[in-house]
Image (spheres, rainbow, N blue to C red):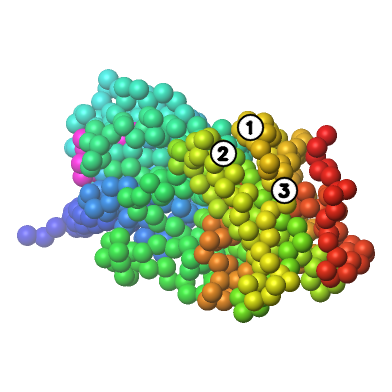
Amino acid sequence: MFLATGQHRAIALTIDGVEEKKRCETSLAEFVKCAWHVVEPPGTKLIWNWHLDVICAYMEAVYAGDIKRLIVNIPPGTMKSLVIMVFYPSWVWARRQGERFLCGTNDGTLATRDAVRMRQLITSEWYKSHWGAKVQLSVDQQDKGLFANTYRGHRESQSILGKVTGKRGSTLLWDDPHDANSVESDVQRQSVIDAYDQGWSSRRNDLENSPIVIVMQRVHYADITGHLLKKGNWTRLAIPMRYDPDTTYDPVADLNRPDLKDPRTEAGQLLFPQKFPEIAVKELEANLGSYGTAGQLQQNPSPKGGGILRSSLINLWPNTKPLPIMQYIVQSYDTAFTEDTMNDPTACTVWGVFWHEGKTNVMLIDCWQEHMEYPALRQRVIKEWSSKYAGNPKDISNPARSPDIVLIEKKGSGQSLLQDLSATKIRIAGYNPGLAGKVARAHLITPIMDSGVIWIIESKAGDSWPTWATWLEKQIDRFPNDEHDDGVDTMTQALRYLKDSGFVSLSQSERIHENRPLITKEKGNPYAQ
């Protein structure tokens, strides 16, 4: 029996179609490649890159139930929304038609955009040729924001901050939950976190097994990524624009897939050079600035080496060298009356003024932070006032010194403490920062840090900060994007006080004998008025 040419072609097409269907069902990456022409304008070429294989593999693990909580941190423009918010749910319906997706973004219009793209895909001739017998939209529910199939699977899409009461899903998908243009607002960030904690997290059909996927660019240490990683039990896939061995992922531990390791080996290598070549990335970095680059491109929301403030500008006093004679000591507090670890802690830094190499210098000699209620805080301040700092036991001319003054911000919770301690023998100064915000105050002390007169004693191991101060070191480098900034507030408060009181002079034009006291009784508190 002989077949006509047309029959041969039809059989070949059928075989090709069966093989394509099988490839697509077993591989999300193959599905994306084959379905690309449906969701993108004609002639738009798909440029495939290794990171897409990685994202697809992690999403396959979500489908299989091997990963139940996934955070994907990756730069914008890398197909993250298309793969996770459009292709993935369409691929799942090809295999498990009853899946119910509850999807959210920071902007309801973007949620609708991706929902429309998915609906266009599953109603396309290409998709129906493979799975049309299984996936058919219900005529009763075909809205842009909510459409369902005949197997009672559905996709519901909305703004993250919208009401979710009464809505549920077997898979939760979030895309860019924060608005990058307003993420500096504590209120905006907290609203997203509250939306997750108090709403979306309980909207899963199975609170133990229903997966949650959040894909986003980092924008702040206190963004939803930082909040959830702090809680634990989340898998994080972090892929920076420029290779950084400190910001990566572990496909061996997560998936048992060593073949999916980041192929880059040298710091600075680009993620997607076919789409984002060096010249384009440099332009992005210039437009975003150091903090935008660190968060949105590098997925680590503080610039390498620090941003406004840099801990590298604080000199390390050799641990083999005796501490200098301290001539004035300041205890600086940023207070918060709460034991709730989700809120800001109280922070204290202690600074000593000394003479070194012909000029006045300042050394950080102690620091701590702790969550405590008001009675415990009051007792702690009284106790710390009796502390003695620095000194050299082998040198009678360099005894340990008691603090000379306590600085407490004259606003908010500090007001109560100032009033309460005014009846004690503690010498207290109420610090008034005026109208300057935290960032503005940080800028005011950068000339002092740049002048090279700030010190901290190095760790016992040498060439690093001591362990008791590493929390502050990180906070300095991450400012203003760290989860807390209380330690930085105490530092800016103390250094501004010392500068405005005349203890630290940027010009250092006034020569003072090495052992001449830098403080006299006549010097007053410049913030007493």
Instruction: Evaluate if marks 1 and 2 touch, with contact meaning CB atoms under 8 Å apart.
Output: yes
391 displayed left or right of 525? left
Q: Amino acid at mark 3?
A: Ile
Residue 420: image tag: 1
How far across and how far down the image is residue 142, in percent?
33, 24
Which residue ends up furthest to the left in the rendered image?
1
Range shown magenta:
94-102
What element does badge 2 sit on? helix
Q: How far apart in space, not on screen, are marks 3 and 1 (Cα)?
A: 16 Å
Provide the residue designation for mark 2: 378
Instruction: Evaluate if marks 3 and 1 touch, with contact meaning CB atoms under 8 Å apart.
Output: no
What element does badge 1 sit on? helix
269 displayed left or right of 146? right
Q: Quadrant of the C terminus?
A: top right
Above-or-below relation of 207 to 395: above
Above-or-below relation of 487 to 448: above
